[in-house]
Amino acid sequence: MEAISRFFDGDVWWSFKRSPVTVIAAILATICILGAVLAPVIAPHNPYDLAEISLLDSNLPPAWIASGNAKFLLGTDQQGRDILSTIMYGSRVSLLVAVSAVAMSIVMGVSAGLLAGYVGGRVDSIIMRIADIQLTFPAILVALLISGIGRQFVPREMQDAIALYVIIFSIGLTGWVQYARTVRGSTLVEKSKEYVQAARVIGVSQTRIMFSHVLPNVLGPVLVIATLNIANAIIAEATLSFLGVGMPPTQPSLGTLISEGQNYLFSGEWWITVFPGVVLIVMVISVNLVGDWLRDALNPKLR
Amino acid sequence: MSALVQLKNVSKTFDVSAPWLNRVIERKPQTFLHAVSEVSFEIKRGETLALVGESGCGKSTVARLAVGLYETSTGQVIIDGHDMKASNQGTDAARAMRRKVQMIFQDPYASLNPRWRVADIVAEPIRTHKLIANGPLLDKRVAELLGLVKLTAKDGEKYPHQFSGGQRQRISIARALASNPEFLICDEPTSALDVSVQAQVLNLMKDLQREMGLTYLFISHNLQVVHHIADRVGVMYLGRIVEIGDKDEVFGAPKHPYTRMLLDAIPDLHMTGIARTPVAGEVPNPLNPPSGCAFNPRCPKKFEPCDKARPQLVSFSGREVACYAATGQDKPVDMTTALA
């Protein structure tokens, strides 16, 4: 309770209130996230319940166009699924992938950076050279490579089932370097501070110093990078899905929806691809803006 | 009484060479910094030895060697009969040694983990050495320790940033005392504090020493502070002890020209208006120390033998001092032995 009131009295909340762009971005991001998380509860239709969809409703335009149907606010696709509902279910997949991938990057990157910075010497050199090598490959290339390899090893009928894990793993793997570098830098700073030496004098073991003294003090910047990287991960997932190596049409993410929808663009059903695209843009920009604000708000040098 | 702490011929060199690849390409040799050279002293139980000297003279390195944060390059640090080198091995004996030797750091803003509550900071040595199990007994002990340094048990709930510099330094003292140590190393514990707070912390340290029979190694560049707290004083210059002896002897009648220069530089109310001799020149580069006595380029009493061979520490008028001019080591006979 005390922590909550301190938060609302604090600088961070103050700078949040003062920035209208951030407030709007935060509201939009919250709507997107809530819509995605609560999709099974609040979506007007269940697009994956075959009993509910009807081919008679296929290719309906958005409700405000004359031939539209008020039941389907943003229109329907070629199979009669409600676009609004598919978007909500799709953002759910997109967000799940993004959050899991970022969590994986954080775990990998923070451990690698902490180890490199604290142990130093040869361990440091090896970890950071691996990071450098990783950086020379574009993230999308690595992700394509991993999804490609991942698919080779499983039978065709199981590929859809593991697609989610493959994509989380490939996006997660490409993201760890940034965390590792940041955490290594802050670890080097913290390591030389006297409280770490004090712990050594007391006789605390190196592992314990690393996790209970250094780790809590290097996590601040990680939070900021993580917020910004969620937006990047959403984009990366959409890109992979668009290219056909991401989520299968049976479990579509926003990227898959855009990719499927563009086949109908020239036949006039623009809403199938445009609305998922707009949602993707809004989601990414709003998360990014919140992340930018967080970076400035938590940076003591800019206060 | 026997000595609790003994440093025997302790030296510490740091490898400050450029990275291997650069050395090979630029054809530079490896370079070593001799931070501390052949330092020997003893501290008796319950006594305070202060080490003074200018920045970069190696006094903090001696502190870190004594506490085991650095390993000696040559020589031994012996505390209560045990070699400190063993203290970083995970054995029970090593842990017991760690418990006996604690350190108070210079910067009270950096020596407390900002994300820990004060009670946890003070309890850390107790938990690490498993002296008291978690529970009401531990809480009581922490409260008692905070009381020792004139803080209240309620302060334990707060975080370090909610305290002033002097209070933080007292928390640091409470932490150092938590494991019932016998030997405390204080690395400029008051240099980051206001003068009024300095006195408070120093008096607290003196009281604690009397009550608990602590032994201090006190590192400082502030001679007034040293005069207040020390029993014996060692003056260091460029990694070596140049004069060491009882406080009253060293301060009352300094023999080494460097000690005299340091004492002459103290501002004094009685001397208002009188020009003081500033300490002339600067500390030479320790990577490339002068030949002979390291002090000779700055020494007002420099004469022939000073840049030829290094004077040895010899007992002279109640203290040990390393200076040809002061001890009369300049006689031709002594010269040959010194060079040999």
Image (cartoon, rainbow, N blue to C red):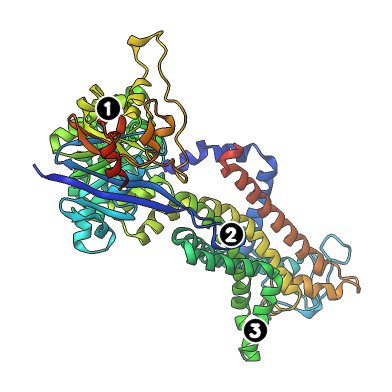
The answer to which quarter of the image holds residue B83 is: bottom left
Q: How far separated are the C-alphas under marks 3 and 1?
A: 79 Å
Sequence order check: which comes first, mark 2 or mark 1?
2
Q: How far separated are the C-alphas under marks 2 and 1?
A: 44 Å
Front-lying residue, A289 or B331: B331
Q: Secondary structure at mark 2?
A: loop
Q: In front: mark 2 or mark 3?
A: 2
- Name the amino acid type tagged 1: Lys
Instruction: Give the residue number, with chain letter if any, for mark 3.
Output: A149
Instruction: Give the residue number, with chain letter if any, for mark 2.
Output: B27
The percent coordinates of residue A240 (x first, y second) are: 71, 73
Residue at point 67%, 53% (across, down): A288
> Which residue reaches farthest top?
B273
Q: Mark 1 and mark 2 in contact (Cβ < 8 Å)?
A: no
Q: Is residue A35 found left or right of B295 in the rendered image?
A: right
Q: Secondary structure at mark 1?
A: loop
Mark 2 belongs to chain: B
The percent coordinates of residue A287 (x first, y second) are: 66, 54
- Name the amino acid type tagged 2: Arg
The percent coordinates of residue B191 (x first, y second) are: 37, 31
Instruction: Give the residue number, with chain letter if any, for mark 1.
Output: B255
Image: A49 above or below B117: below
Q: Is residue B309 found left or right of A145 in the rendered image?
A: left
Question: Can residue A15 be seen in this snapshot?
Answer: yes
